[in-house]
Image (cartoon, grey):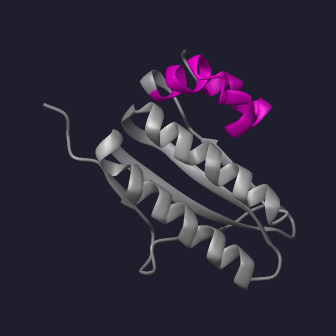
Amino acid sequence: MRERATVVDERPGRVATVPGGTDDAVLRLRATGALDASVHRQVSAAVQRALTEVAARSGLRRIEVDLGAASFLSAAVAGALAHGAHRAAEQQCVLRVINASGIAARVLVISRLWPVLCDRDDVGTRDA
C-alpha cells in the first residue's frame, strides 16, 4: 500500500521562500508520498498559489518543486507540473522540478518532460 501523498510547505501559506541566487528569491514547494491522479488537483492548486505569489512579489522569478520525497509520480501530476511551467513562463518566471529520482525521474524522462521541467545540471541526480 502506498503512503498517502501530501503537498507540504515550510511555513503557513503553503509556499516557502528560500534564497535563490545572488538577487533572486525562489519559491519552493515540496511534494511527498505517492503523487498519483488523486492529488492532481492538490498539486495544481499549490502551483497556482505559487504563481499568484510570484505575481504579487517583485524579484521572485523561480518556483522549485522538490520531488525528493515523492515515492510515485503519475502522468497526470507530471502534466500538471508542465502546465504550471508553461503558465510560469507567461509570467516571465521559471518553474523547475528538483531532486527527482527513481520513478519520478523515469516518468519525467519517458514523458519527455525532463528537459521542460528540470535544469541540465540536475541530470546527475536522476537514476532513470
Q: Position of residue 80 (x, y in %)?
A: 53, 47
Do we see residue 16 in this rendering?
no
Residue at 73% over, 36% down: 116
Residue 57 point in image, percent of width and height: 74, 83
Question: Residue placed at 85% from the left, 63% from the top?
Answer: 92
Please indicate whether residue 61 sits to the left or right of residue 40 in the image: right
Indicate whether 126 appears above or below 49. Answer: above
**Which residue ends up furthest to the left in the rendered image?**
1
**Residue 23 x/y as whole percent:** 87, 70
State the extent of the magenta-drawn residues as a range: 104-125
Quadrant housing the C terminus: top right
Examine the structure image and report whether residue 8 is included in the region drawn in magenta.
Answer: no
Quadrant of residue 120 within the rendered picture: top right
Residue 79 point in image, percent of width and height? 55, 40
Q: Is residue 12 left or right of residue 52?
A: left
Between residues 76 and 19, which one lies in front from this camera angle? 76
Q: Is residue 107 left or right of residue 95?
A: left
The mark total stands at 0
Residue placed most toward the observer, 105 or 10: 105
Location of residue 105 by image quarter: top right
The rendered magenta stretch, by its main secondary structure, is classed as helix
